[in-house]
Amino acid sequence: MPRTRNENGIDIPLTAEEEAARDIEDDAGIAALPMNKWKSDISRLDDGMPRWFEDAVTDGSVVLKPGRVKDNYDSKVVLRGEKP
Amino acid sequence: MSTTKVQGDMIDVDAATVAVVAVGDKFNFLDITDSLVKEDTVQGIVDLVPAGGAWNLIGTSVASSSASLTITGLNSTYDTYAVALADIVPATDTALGWIRFGDSSGIDTGAADYGWGHYGGLVDNTTAGFVGSEDNSDAQILCTHTTGAGSAAGEGFGAMLYLTSPSDGTTLSMITGTTATANPTVADFYNGQLFGVRRNVITMDRILFQFSTGNIASGRMTVWGIAHA
């Protein structure tokens, strides 16, 4: 049974061409879900430690002592290692 | 100046026929400025109500396991259009909400047709964190957070958005407004400020909402034209 789209309150069956295009989008959408979640997680950590500061720690320009900031940095390192 | 008051009995109208008032119906009234009985219509009263600023319904689309929702009929009549996405639930958990524009030839889906930015706050069980995402060259406008909308009981998506130009506008077709996403099983709650743009000028006459994958299980999209006079 073909999918339908609703236009101005009327259900319209997708054409064969629309079905094919939608299948491609569906597959890409499913494949992107893990990356979407990862982007959200890293974005949340960016709020506590911007990327430029993270890079400065990574290249040794800034040395962190144990504490909340270092915990944030360590969390970002772990998360970057889990990038899909 | 003396005034004479006359007291009269009300006519018993209990047995009057029930009828719906129409704009063309006539009535009499006493104009005390010249003491004359005059005649007007219901339309005469309606005309006294100041016009302007009214929201005029363009269309509404209700999802029932629908691939997308589309409203057509946007034109040059109104400079601003309001778009409400209400009670939207995806069939696929964490699917992203997408908006696309189109003209009389259909919905635009080119890989570089759109730009968008999404900025707001995630509300989880520890902190309220600011998050943002953007893409200046995409095939759609992302209107949920990047973790998408949840499909479990109570989860979903809603938004109140505005199109900032008429179909024959000088500027690019842009949309802006606020969004709300509930997806507590993945990323809790998200409130966001959305900006989206069709990167080329088109004679925009339609707007579409869909998810990145799967159908829209339920929900409604409604579009109004906002009068400026």
Image (cartoon, coloured by chain):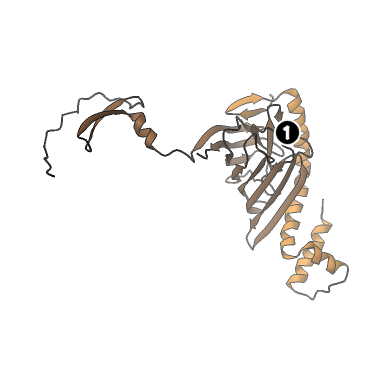
Name the residue: 75% across, 36% down.
Answer: A26
In the rendered image, is residue A31 in sight? yes
Q: Which of B45 and A41 is in front in this view?
A: B45
Quarter of the image for residue B47 reads top left
Q: Give the residue at the far bottom of this rendering.
A: A65
Name the residue: 65% across, 56% down.
Answer: B122
Q: Give the residue at the far front of this rendering.
A: B1
Element carrying mark 1 = loop
Q: Nearer the viewer, residue B84 or B103?
A: B103
Seen in the picture, residue B184 relative to A63 is either above or below; the reply is: above
In the rendered image, is residue B184 in sight? no
Q: Which of B15 and B26 is in front in this view?
A: B26
- Look at the image and tell me in which quarter the N terminus of chain B lies: top left
Residue B197 position, x and y percent, is: 70, 43
Q: Viewed as shown, does residue B135 lie left or right of B67?
A: right
Q: Which amino acid type corresponds to the residue marked 1 in the rendered image?
A: Asp
Residue B22 position, x and y percent, is: 35, 26
Residue B172 position, x and y percent, is: 69, 40
Quarter of the image for residue B8 reads top left
Q: Colour of chain B?
A: brown
Q: Note the chain letter of the orange one.
A: A
Q: Which of B204 and A71 is in front in this view?
A: B204
Residue B121 position, x and y percent, is: 64, 56
Seen in the picture, residue A79 relative to B47 is either above or below; the reply is: below
Few, some or many residues within 10 Å of mark 1 (<14, 14–19, 20+): many
Q: Mark 1 points at which residue?
A: B108
